[in-house]
Amino acid sequence: MSGAGKKIADVAFKAGRTIDWDGMAKLIVSDEAKKEFSSLRRAFDEVNSQLQTKFSQEPEPIDWEYYRKGIGSRLVDMYKEAYESVEIPKYVDNVTPQYKPKFDALLVELKEAEEKSVKESARLEKEIADVQELKTKLSTMTADEYFEKHPELKQKFDDEIRNDYWGY
């Protein structure tokens, strides 16, 4: 197997182990997105399996003696010499060093966006809980109880009354 093919197979195998498929599946809400996600996972697994089976194995050595018996040693020796003289160039990765810093910067940006999103989600969940609590208590809540939770509104109303401003 060539160096590039083995490297690709190794990277795909490692990526398959590090992807949190179950964690990502929990984040998907719609049925259509779940179908798309499962087809993506199936396609990834198929490609990864092919990379592991086809490209990670060394080719079987050629049995030159078998061919010498059927064809003749002179022709087989000529093919053997030509086969052994073929040099497969090693893959030199010139692309990854160019894009690695950009990718790393994107990962940092992604982490920051994730943290911001988690904080915003927690804030919104708290706000939803507060609104639901307010909704259940609204029919029996007194003005004092409401102003206890919202002192800035009490101050505003007190200022309006003090300044004889009744909203019209």
Image (cartoon, helix red, strand yellow):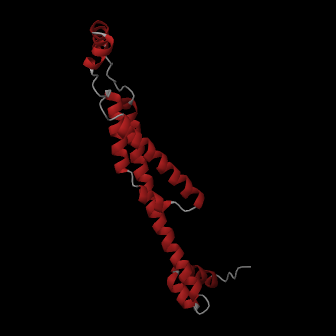
| Observer-nearest of 58 and 80 | 80
Query: In the rendered view of the protein, which quadrant contains the C terminus?
Result: bottom right
* Residue at 56 percent of width and 83 percent of height: 134
Q: How many badges with numbers are in the image?
A: 0
Q: Residue at x 42, y 59 (%)?
A: 22
Most extreme residue toward the right, as rendered? 168
- Residue 125 placement (x, y as % from top left): 49, 71
Q: Residue placed farthest to the front in the image?
A: 70
Pick the quarter of the image with the N terminus.
top left
- 74 to 47, vertically: above or below: above
Q: Estimate the x, y position of residue 81 in percent, counting from the top left.
A: 28, 10
Camera-side residue of 154 and 39: 39
Q: Quadrant of residue 9?
A: top left
Above or below, 154 relative to 11: below
> Looking at this rendering, what residue extends furthest in the left direction?
65
Of residues 48 and 83, the one nearer the viewer is 83
Residue found 44% across the figure and 63% down from its top = 119
Camera-side residue: 29 or 146?
A: 29
Q: Position of residue 124 (x, y in %)?
A: 51, 69
The answer to whether residue 154 is visible is no
Instruction: Specify the quadrant of the image occupied by residue 146.
Output: bottom right
Q: Position of residue 106 (x, y in %)?
A: 42, 43
Q: Does the image show residue 138? A: yes
Relative to 117, say whether 141 is above or below.
below
